[in-house]
Image (spheres, helix red, strand yellow):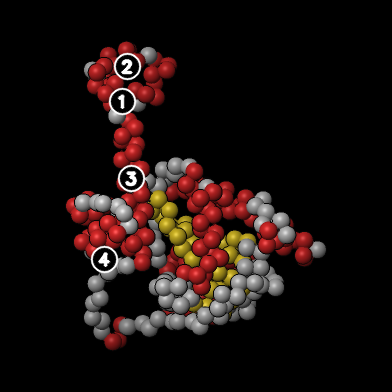
Amino acid sequence: MIDELRCSHGITRLLSITGIPRSSYYKWRATQPQRDARQDREREIKEHMMAIHFANREFGYPRMTTALWESGLNVNHKKVWRIMRELSIQSVIRKKRKKSSYTPSVIYPNRLKRKFHATAPQQKMVTDITYISDGNTFVYLSVIQDLFNNEIVAWQLSKRNDVQLVLDTVEQWTQKRDVSEAVLHSDQGFQYTSQVYNSRLEAFGVKGSHSRKATCLDNACIESFFSHLKTEKLYLIQCNSEAEIRQAVEDYVYNYNYRRFQAKLKQRAPIEYRCALAA
């Protein structure tokens, strides 16, 4: 607060009002770079931990600590335990279920087989979820992309990485256009293998498609979009809330669809390319 008001009220007066010794204030200012560096490092650790958790949900804090060390991040196990509690990361322990309550997963064949070229809109679609940090916690971004022109046709943001996030994204996509006979490709995350997701696709006449397990290149196009989003937008700014992240994603998706020229599209933006071919 003092730093925010010092230009308009003077540092001497502010220190007198707050009762803070001048030496303490200047010591605090001198150590600001170190505090910023610690915050940056903790943010990096959190992002690595979330990535490790997504790939290895069975990891508790001992194995999480080992995985961080293998990534070059020497973090004390007590700190790992604290951060896991902050991020609500828990290892998934398999529990016995009654047969009557068991719901089998739906696994689709890989209909794309890395053939990402599409000859018409709404022919081959890809979808996935990524996480975005606001410095303290994470929100989850679900996206659907049309491989015909790389257009982002639907996206949703949520604090929960659950089936509802995926269903909301599909709902947004289906409201805009006829999607019957489209192929919607994803990984084998629990959201995309659920019975309710399968039922929703069937209701709209959409053909599901799944990558092979632990084969991210089977869905390389959507991974590429997430990489562009983070390196061209999110890593260049500091988002401190879900609202700020939402605005940043909205701005980037608009620019990506309308203004980001792509060599694949003959140096046109996705929507410009689609409209030109439809004319």
Q: CA distance from mark 4 to mark 1?
A: 39 Å
Q: CA distance from mark 2 to mark 1?
A: 18 Å
Q: In the rendered structure, which amino acid carries the disc numbered 3?
A: Arg
The residue shown at (31%, 54%) is: 72
SS type, badge 2? helix
Pick the residue in front: 174 or 15: 15
The picture places residue 96, in percent across and down from the top left corner, at 23, 81
Q: In the image, 279: left or right of 214?
A: right
Q: Is residue 82 visible?
A: no
How would you rate the neighbour count of disc 3 (Cα within 10 Å): few for under 14, some for 14-19, many for 20 or more?
few
How would you rate the neighbour count of disc 1 (Cα within 10 Å): few for under 14, some for 14-19, many for 20 or more?
few
Task: Using the image, tell me which numbered label, if any, was put on residue 191.
Answer: none
Question: Disc 1 marks which residue?
Answer: 30
Q: Is residue 31 above or below residue 57?
A: above
Q: In the rendered structure, which amino acid carries the disc numbered 1?
A: Ala
SS type, badge 3? helix
Q: CA distance from mark 4 to mark 2?
A: 49 Å
Task: Using the image, tell me which numbered label, if any, was put on residue 14.
Answer: 2
Q: In the rendered structure, which amino acid carries the disc numbered 4?
A: Phe
Q: Is residue 250 above or below residue 112?
A: above
Query: Which label's residue is closer to the chain start, 3 or 2?
Result: 2
